[in-house]
């Protein structure tokens, strides 16, 4: 049986160096210390060798082991090589402070980047060093000579931050450390977090603060840290009679205070400034009807619903979170209205470009340190040591009217008057969305019932360090063709879960029927869908509209010339529909002000029906109020999804911005995305999803009446000039 002897070393030992002499037990197969191990077969083979063993840990934040730090025994340039121009040009260092012909001092950082075969990422993202990589060493004789003679005692720290250099000459040696904090594995920092968290001046960065300003002086670079320490190396075999071994230890602590971050990204688009839903039906203008709230304005469906009329702008985000001092148990019983906080925009980095957006956010929960054996160990949130690893909160997104104004104004006429008077006007409103949100049938958040509103507020996301996240939204569709307003109402008009009731929907509604309930009624009366053609030029009196150029992906084919997306989940990109609301109530439509696409409706609801279309005092969270425009949570399901790095790299290779998973060739998605066939696992922070999609959504061809669930995943990288995957590359957050 293998026997191992452990030498216990306190990873938080005060003092820079420490000598350990331990009597080696017989029949020992290996010696363990920190996260390292020495095979005693190697030990006994060199029993009479006159050398030492140097071990140590590189740490930051008072107790986090730093991976991929470089440690070496500095060897001065030998006199016989001083006159050798070829050797000296590669290695001119008589002291670590000497500089090479590029003006760079002695260092162990790579001179060029290479692709990591495991992650397919370019590492480092920006090379600043002068150390040759393996490919150069094996193909360049000068590099090989220098490497074998002057870099023979060199090591990289492992995931725990530990290193070991075996066979070091005894006596006083100079031990060198090189660290690039943008290239230290799971703790790597990016330029954005260096500005926000480390206080570096923006002048040290270029390309909108996404890249470090180059310099040959390593001392000028905010991401580079080098150190030298003189260490007296003791012999490994200190007592060959009593089998006593000696190990020299030298730890390093880097000065940078590391902060873990995660990234949320996506793209967004909305309707044109002249478009909304809610206008008089030109086909039947004789009476004001509820179904008119579903009709496009303007009536030309190609203008109102076609992809070519959409637009992009700068999104407005609000990030709500739970503070560090709240435990998970306390969060489960918390009141988001008072216990959540709103993240100050100065506390995270946000980038916007043509409808794309990226948020880089600090973790603030679950602090850990590295223990003696190299494992992550939890410590209290207020411990001065360690690093946070998670974040819990939710995000709201909207396009403000200041950013993207809407000038559409229409009306729903009184019977036979032929004109639109003030009380008949319909004005535009753009929906807002909370991520994540979901509710059972008829259980949408409502100001009159705290049970559903509290459930809505409590749904949030647990984010983890160094991961990428994006948005997924279910695109519901509603159509209504009933002319009998009196028959639109539910017999049961009280709040509550009722799968057998309409629950605030009109009886004439066709829910999640993207392929239209009645083509003779017109294709411009299905609210929420996106209409386009693939490879076909649509025309009207205004000229050619080429929807195909926007590369949207359809899930619903009404005809070969009429393709749409609706009644299913779309990942990566978020569409914000514009709908109209009636300025004043009218008994003609039982005081309805807006379609039930936005929120639940109740017969004669003079107070309830206009509540979410005007400013109000309903709490959201974190002391924030006003739920105007927020879309009902039992129909507009949303989610935040983790996007593995491998998937991001694969998405970047697609030839079109809209695609399905079966268009990725033989590649199998690594992430768990939303579609008509997937129910996420229950979690304490998101709750229990009652189905894959609301109201029989996510069915084949976008038809809620179909018994077949659509197993495909749908993605859209962005409308028009936006491309959220490309944006990650442009910002240097992904490099493969």
Image (spheres, helix red, strand yellow):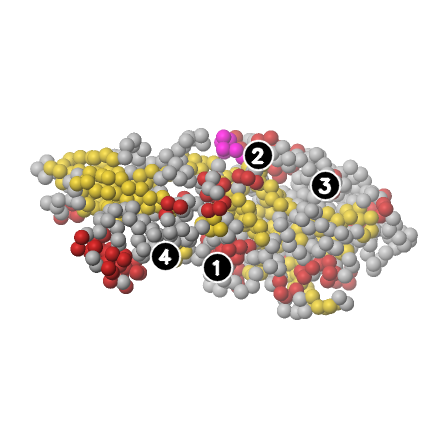
Q: Residues within 10 Å of mark 4 (few under 14, many from 20)?
A: some
Question: Mark 2 touching mark 4, by CB under 8 A?
Answer: no
Q: Which residue is mark 2?
A: 341
Marks 3 and 4: which is nearer the front? 4
Magenta-highlighted stretch: main secondary structure?
A: loop
Marks 2 and 4: which is nearer the front? 4
Q: CA distance from mark 3 to mark 2?
A: 23 Å
- Please provide percent x and percent y for residue 409: 79, 51
Check the image and report above or below for 307 versus 351: below
- Please provide percent x and percent y for residue 286: 88, 55
Q: Magenta segment range?
A: 322-328
Q: Which mark is residue 112?
A: 4
Q: Residues within 10 Å of mark 2 (few under 14, many from 20)?
A: some
SS category of the residue bearing label 2: strand
Q: CA distance from mark 1 to mark 3?
A: 41 Å
Which mark sits nearer the N-terminus, 3 or 2?
A: 2
Q: Residue at x 41, y 56 (%)?
A: 122
Q: Which mark is residue 650?
A: 1
Question: Mark 3 touching mark 2, by CB under 8 A?
Answer: no
Q: CA distance from mark 4 to mark 1?
A: 25 Å
Q: Which residue is mark 3?
A: 612
Magenta stretch containing residue 413, yes or no?
no
Q: Residues within 10 Å of mark 1 (few under 14, many from 20)?
A: some
């Amino acid at each position: 049986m293998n026997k191992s002897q452990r030498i216990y070393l306190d990873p938080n030992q005060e003092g820079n160096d420490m000598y350990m002499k331990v009597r080696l037990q017989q029949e020992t197969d290996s010696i363990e210390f920190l996260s390292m191990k020495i095979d005693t077969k190697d030990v006994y083979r060199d029993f009479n060798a006159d050398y030492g063993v140097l071990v140590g840990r590189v740490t930051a934040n008072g107790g986090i082991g730093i991976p991929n730090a470089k440690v070496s025994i500095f060897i001065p340039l030998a006199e016989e090589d001083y006159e050798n121009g070829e050797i000296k040009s590669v290695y001119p260092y008589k002291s670590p402070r000497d500089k090479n012909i590029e003006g760079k001092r002695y260092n162990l950082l790579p001179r060029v980047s290479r692709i990591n075969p495991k992650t397919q990422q370019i590492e480092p993202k920006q090379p600043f060093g002068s150390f040759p990589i393996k490919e150069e060493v094996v193909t360049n004789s000068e590099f090989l000579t220098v490497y074998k003679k002057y870099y023979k005692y060199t090591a990289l720290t492992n995931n725990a931050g530990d290193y070991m250099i075996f066979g070091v000459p005894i006596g006083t040696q100079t031990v060198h450390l090189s660290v690039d904090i943008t290239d230290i594995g799971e703790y790597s920092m990016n330029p954005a977090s260096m500005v926000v968290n480390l206080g570096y001046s923006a002048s040290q960065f270029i390309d909108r603060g996404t890249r470090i300003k180059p310099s040959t002086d390593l001392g000028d670079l905010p991401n580079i840290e080098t150190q030298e320490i003189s260490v007296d190396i003791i012999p490994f075999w200190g007592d060959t009679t009593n089998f006593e071994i000696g190990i020299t230890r030298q730890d390093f602590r880097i000065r940078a205070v590391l902060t873990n971050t995660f990234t949320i990204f996506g793209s967004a688009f909305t309707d044109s400034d002249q478009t909304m839903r809610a206008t008089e039906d030109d086909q039947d203008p004789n009476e004001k009807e509820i179904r008119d709230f579903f009709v496009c304005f303007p009536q030309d469906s190609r203008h109102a619903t076609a992809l070519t009329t959409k637009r992009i702008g700068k999104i407005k985000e609000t990030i709500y979170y739970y503070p560090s001092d709240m435990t998970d148990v306390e969060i489960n019983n918390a009141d988001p209205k008072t216990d959540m906080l709103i993240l100050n925009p100065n506390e995270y980095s946000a980038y916007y470009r043509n409808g794309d957006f990226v948020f880089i956010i600090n973790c603030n929960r679950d602090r850990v340190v590295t223990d003696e054996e190299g494992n992550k160990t939890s410590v209290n949130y207020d411990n001065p040591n360690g690093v946070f690893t998670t974040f819990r909160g939710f995000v709201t997104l909207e396009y403000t009217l200041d950013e993207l104004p809407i000038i559409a104004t229409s009306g729903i006429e009184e019977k036979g008057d032929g004109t639109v008077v003030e009380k008949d006007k319909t004005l535009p409103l753009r929906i807002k969305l909370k991520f994540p949100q979901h509710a059972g049938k008829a259980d949408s958040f409502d100001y009159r019932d705290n049970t559903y509103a509290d459930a809505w507020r409590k749904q949030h996301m647990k984010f983890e360090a160094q991961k990428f996240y994006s948005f997924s939204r279910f695109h519901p569709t509603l159509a209504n063709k009933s002319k009998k307003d009196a028959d639109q109402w539910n017999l049961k008009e009280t709040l509550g879960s009722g799968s057998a009731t309409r629950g605030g929907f009109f009886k004439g509604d066709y829910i999640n029927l993207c392929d239209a309930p009645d083509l003779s009624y017109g294709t411009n009366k299905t609210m929420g869908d996106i209409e386009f053609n693939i490879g076909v030029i649509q025309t009207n009196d205004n000229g050619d509209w080429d929807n195909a150029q926007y590369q949207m992906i359809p899930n619903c084919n009404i005809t070969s010339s009429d393709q749409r997306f609706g009644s299913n989940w779309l990942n990566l990109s978020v569409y914000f529909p514009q709908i109209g609301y009636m300025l004043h109530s009218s008994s003609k439509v039982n005081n309805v002000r807006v379609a039930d696409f936005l929120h639940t409706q109740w017969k004669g609801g003079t107070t309830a029906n206009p509540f979410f279309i005007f400013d109000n005092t309903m709490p959201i969270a974190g002391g924030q109020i006003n739920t105007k425009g927020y879309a009902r949570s039992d129909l507009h399901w949303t989610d935040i999804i983790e996007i593995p790095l491998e998937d991001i790299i694969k998405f970047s290779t697609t030839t079109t911005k809209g695609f399905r998973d079966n268009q990725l060739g033989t590649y199998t998605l690594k992430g768990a995305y939303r579609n008509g066939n997937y129910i996420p696992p229950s979690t304490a922070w998101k709750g229990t999803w009652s189905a894959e999609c609301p109201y029989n959504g996510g069915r084949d061809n976008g038809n809620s009446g179909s018994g077949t669930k659509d197993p495909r995943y749908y993605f859209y990288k962005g409308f028009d000039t936006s491309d959220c995957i490309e944006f990650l590359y442009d910002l240097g957050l992904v490099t493969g």
